Image (cartoon, grey):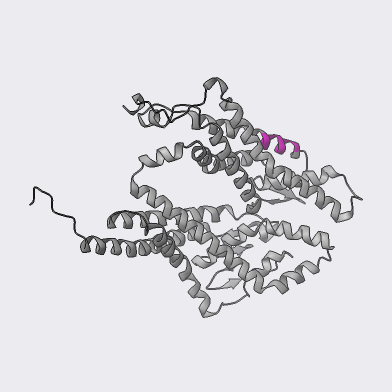
Amino acid sequence: MTSLLTRPDTVRTDPARQRPLVLIATLGGACAALAPLVVLLAVGVIGWFVTDAGVHGAPRDGMRVGALAWLAGHGSGFTVLGARVTIVPLGITAMSVWSMWRLGHRVGDAVSSHGPDADRISDGERDLTVPIAIATFFAGYAVVAVVVATLAAGTTADPSVPRVLAWTTVMTALVAAPAIATGSGRAAIWAALAPPTVRAGAAVAGAVLGTLLVVSMVTFLAALAMSFGEAATMTSSLHPSPAEAGLYSVVNAAFAPNAALYAGSFLLGPGFAVGGATLVSPAAVVVGPLPVVPVLAALPSVGTPAGWVGGLMVIPPLVAAVAAYRTLRPRALTWDQVALAGCGGGLVAGFGFALLASLSGGAAGPGRMRFVGPFTRDVLFHSVTACGVGALLGASVVALLVWRSNRAWPEPESAEDA
């Protein structure tokens, strides 16, 4: 048993000097929620001042707007002039995710000395350090979310507390939990127990999804840059002051990740809608009257796009193939493990993109603007197919190289065969 072996070079923290696990994780969760919230509260106050130099209202009105923006980034939605807006500004969500990851990693590092050491864990001793830290981290984050939602509930905006808690739960499971496990060192121990194919497949999934998101964002920014004049015209039609124009740009930037996912859905083929009975895809572009939002200047012209636009649909599978090849090439796997990891990782990446695309849409206003976003079911089918096939092609190249290398260097005969 490895736990019976003494290791003089290993230093364990005295349990009497360890900081309480529950306190560390709870404060970490609360700080993870407060960090982006404070930033948005400051932006709200600045926005209140620059709009009318503080003539109307009070600073608390700007802070309320900042709090509602933070809640909207957690899926709460809000009501404007009787119209329900449920579209999530994923830029704010990304801020919260980054804060949750950073603080979760620090919490994991702080609690790494709690519980059994690596040798005892390898021997099968039960370790509840990470589950307890995750649960209390969630509790701290959820308390802040509920307090903020309760304080904002008295306004006509009417944020949804259950939706905020649901988003907090999902974010904790997908972001905070891996961060705590990684920071505590448990993730490395658990990952070592997984088969090499599973680890390689997870790496492929992350690489394919990350690369596809980057390509989607570059596509959106390129389209916006080519329509920069139209975007500037939209902004100038509102006659804002320089400070107001800067604030308006920040608001539009909060929806840049949404636009990137729309661009990715466009590249995959199904496209997306910007209102009822509309379609923006490589095959056709049908839109109606749109609100004055500079981000919408990136939309293509109404009608049938040029023939070369359909060729953009080759980008997602090509991206998946390159990402899978670069990820699997340096790994010591057999050819069949390479193929399985590539195909499985690509399928997971496609599902992940469809999941993110489903979160990017929602109601953006009354009437026909009650549906804005990708067509989730179609995007799921196309993304899984494109990423799965593309990653399999990239993995097949690596598998072929591995197979040829094994043939060129056959295994030596054993002494018994000799």
Q: Is residue 158 something that shows in the picture?
A: no
Give x and y (percent) for residue 314: 46, 70
Give the image quarter of residue 251: bottom right
Of 33 and 21, the residue lying toward us:
21
In the figure, is residue 154 to the left or right of 10?
A: right
Number of numbered discs visible in the structure rendering: 0
Give residue 42's position: percent from left, percent from top. Answer: 77, 46
Residue furthest top in the image: 16
| Residue 9 sits above or below residue 243 on the image | above
The residue depicted at 52 percent of the width and 39 percent of the height is: 183
Quadrant placement of the N terminus: top left
Q: Is residue 225 above or below residue 206?
A: below
Q: Residue furthest front?
A: 8
Asked whether 27 or 82 is in front, the reply is 27
Kindly give the residue lying farthest to the right in the view shown.
Answer: 55
Asked if residue 223 is positioned above or below residue 26 in the image, the reply reads below
Residue 242: give x, y in percent of width and height.
Answer: 83, 63
Nearer to us in this view, 52 or 121: 121
Q: Is residue 210 visible in this depiction of the protein?
A: yes
* Of 85 and 334, the residue lying toward us: 334
Query: Secondary structure of the magenta portion, mostly?
Result: helix
Q: Is residue 139 magenta?
A: no
At 62% from the left and 35% from the top, the residue drawn is 28
Which residue lies at the image location 77% right of the left edge and 57% below the top edge? Answer: 247
Residue with the most extreme bottom position: 307
Q: Is residue 150 magenta?
A: yes
First to last magenta residue range: 144-151
